[in-house]
Image: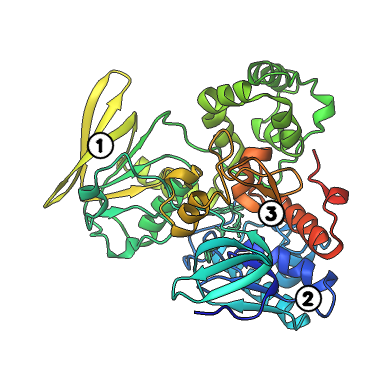
Amino acid sequence: MTATRTHDLAVIGGGLSATALACELGRHAGPAFRAVFFNRADLGPGTAYAPQSASLLMNGPVRAMSAVPGDDRHLAHYLVNETDDALICRARFGAYLRATSANALAQHAGLSHERAEIVDIERIDAGYRLTDERGKRHDARNVVFALGNLPPDDRFLPESVRRHPGYAGDPWTADIARFDPTADVVIIGSRLTAMDTIALLDERAFRGRVHIISRHGLLPLIEDTTVRGVDAGTLDLDTRTPYTLLRSMRAAEKRFSGDWRALAEALRPITPAIWRGWDNRERKRFLRHLQSMWAVHRYRVPPATYAAFERMNNEGRITIYRGRVVSGIARPNGITLEIQGRNGAFTLHAAYVVNCTGPNANLRTVAHPLVQNAIARGIMRPDPLALGIDANDDYRVIDAGGNSQPNLFAMGPLLRGLWYETTAVNEIRQHATAIAAALVHGDASMLHHAS
Ligand SMILES: Cc1cc2nc3c(=O)[nH]c(=O)nc-3n(C[C@H](O)[C@H](O)[C@H](O)COP(=O)(O)OP(=O)(O)OC[C@H]3O[C@@H](n4cnc5c(N)ncnc54)[C@H](O)[C@@H]3O)c2cc1C
């Protein structure tokens, strides 16, 4: 099968990352520039903002969520009647992204959307050849990976459990409405997606019991959008290692008798610089010992979502266990999970199990054919800590031989290994600005990520 004409750019993925990039290209690319965005569904909502439930809320305020680089008020103007501190419904943000990407495509005749899933990528003389799920080929001089959040890893469960009708392996597309509202549910994980799952169950008048199993049993703090970050410069932080940082944060918290949320906010803008300052040994220490603690302070649950958890908890219908799920058994009446706890092994049985362990960042274990093929062809490799894709700080993807590829970029959650914080809207806007500059002017160095 022959490929169609060679595009200047192919963007694989169509969520917030692609939307921000489309906005930048719409404004800055010359009239002859041709870019195609691949995404099966409408451009905009992506994985994070596609679910249509009113119970699923943003965990960041309107003032911080504009998708348009350089226009911080864009979302506020679109919404008209919302306050800056409001936490809007994720479906509404998805609609905003749909409208914003459609607008970007309408403004530049060279930008287009193709409803396709890309399953393979190979190098050709002119750049890269992509193949979609129907076998159609698309050639492009430049490619951007904007794949976003990949479904959780569940290789710790046997195939028989993963295929069980009571098992929901992808919590963002799980059809919780089909759950028997009187049956028990086990949720693996205790962070934001677990809280979202409880809110969805509550919305559907669920009357059963919820068992939450997680390694540390830590719940996210509740978001308060009126809490502002203090100036990190005033905190006297010792950022040399994860432990010196933790110690100095504890001291700062006492001195300021402050709110941990304000400290987490203070750390956000300087997180990439702190991460870059650590070698891989320190980074591993952070991941092993402090990541969970950081996550519950940094990624906070909207009060309305927490209220659903609290209601069920007050009725004695939620139990939290600490431990690691090591395997499971599929049974006719549900799933039995085998768990290794601090004080020994135990089991949990329920009609339903929802895997809320978070996006799978370890590309070697991602089942998607594009990722597998790109690794097999040496076009991408995981970063040294398996947090995402290996790339340089000019967003260029590093191949299996360690070479930076001038025409292959990555953005969004895939870049976690580089700066650790790469999923928030402001970070994604920065990625879009830098990559668009590289594509349009051939220079991303002017616009490196603030670090
Ligand atoms: C459930 C959830 C809720 C979140 N809520 C918030 C929030 O409230 N506030 C916040 O700041 N951050 C939030 N985040 C963080 C989130 O990572 C970013 O805000 C943002 O959505 C990432 O955008 P993205 O486009 O990179 O990825 P995604 O939203 O994951 O979109 C990627 C898109 O690419 C498509 N795609 C992937 N592979 C291919 C392929 N091979 N071919 C074609 N298409 C492909 C996917 O189907 C998807 O549509 C949330 C994340 C999740 C998972």
The residue at which mark 2 appears reads as: 33
Q: What residue is shown at x 48% (from left), y 47% (from top)?
A: 359
Could you give the CA–CA distance between mark 1 and mark 3, rounded to whole angstroms?
36 Å
Residue 118 in sight from this viewpoint: yes
Q: Where is 201 relative to 131, above or below? A: above
Give the label on residue 327, or none.
1
**Residue 144 at x, y = what percent?**
66, 60
Q: What element carries label 3?
A: helix
The image quadrant where one finds the C terminus is top right
Mark 3, ligand 1, within 8 Å: the answer is yes
Residue 239 horizontal/vertical position (percent): 73, 21
* Residue, disc 3: 425
Q: Which of marks 2 and 3 is in front?
A: 2
Q: Where is residue 26 in the image (x, y as percent from the top left)?
A: 78, 73
Whole-Å distance between the Cαs marked 2 and 3? 26 Å
Amino acid found under the numbered disc labelled 1? Ser
Q: Of 89 and 352, which appears nearest the observer?
A: 352
Tell me, yes or no, whether the two marked residues, 1 and 2, touch with CB atoms within 8 Å.
no
Q: Specify the amino acid type for callout 2.
A: Phe
Give the residue type at disc 3.
Answer: Val
